[in-house]
Amino acid sequence: MEEKAWKDVEGKDWRLYQKMRPYNLKSFTSKAPANGSVAPDGPALTLAGKPTSLLAEVKALGAANGAAHVAVLFDSLTCPIWRTFAGVDLTNAAYGLPVLHVYVLEAHAVGEFDTPPLPPPVQIKEEIKVHSSEEERAHAAGLAKALLEAKVGGEVAMILDSMSNELERAYEARPFRAYVIEVATSKVAFASGPGPFNVNAKVTGLKAFAKSVLS
């Protein structure tokens, strides 16, 4: 569906799409962690710039909430689908699980993979380019965090992927993706498919898993 949309319907440059959305290609061989596999760790940063790692934050969030599982949601504000509904819907679908958001490289950075003109409700108030520094990534993440908090009505835990994008590559996470990690074993307990399409299936799957472990 994604390939047809870009080749035939939207008429975008196919080679650019292949470069920017490899995980959606039928020919792509995924190496993303599957259910039951050990979740890859990797360097991360707090929004204040403090070094940390994904699994360290998962364990800390799980311990703080007395939870056996933590949902890990990868985010990108410049994805129109993420900021319009997918980011909030996936957060809500965690259904009582603690949620750790990981902000990754931009889905549609200005000058790299521009989106067509969008109506005001979907527009971003400022241009977001390819992150050239940790500070720029933290700024974009702060905007995403504020959007989520305004819509879900509570504080959102968020960290940044490192500028080497190790977590994004390990989890094949751009533009967004959902996982659940078991705190005690650091194993993947749930993995959605890659974004940006078929959001309802991702939301339904995450919600069903969360209900099953919390019931």
Image (cartoon, rainbow, N blue to C red):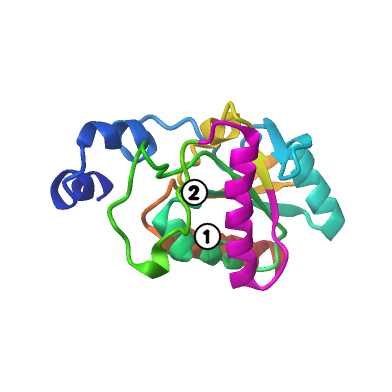
Indicate the secondary structure of the residue bearing disc 2. loop
Indicate whether residue 165 is drawn in magenta: no
Q: Which mark is residue 178?
A: none
Question: Looking at the image, which is closer to me, 13 or 166?
Answer: 13
| Residue 78 percent coordinates (x, y) | 45, 50
Q: Residue at x 46, y 57 (%)?
A: 82
Q: Which residues are magenta?
A: 131-158
2 and 1 marks in contact (CB < 8 Å): yes
10 Å crowding of disc 2: few (<14), some (14-19), many (20+):
many
| Quarter location, residue 51 | top right
Can residue 66 be seen?
no
| Residue 53 percent coordinates (x, y) | 74, 35
Residue tagged by mark 2?
A: 176
Q: Which mark is residue 87?
A: 1
Is 41 left, or right, of 62 in this rendering? left
Point out the tag, 2 or 1, that comes first from the N-terminus. 1
Looking at the picture, which amino acid does disc 2 mark?
Answer: Phe
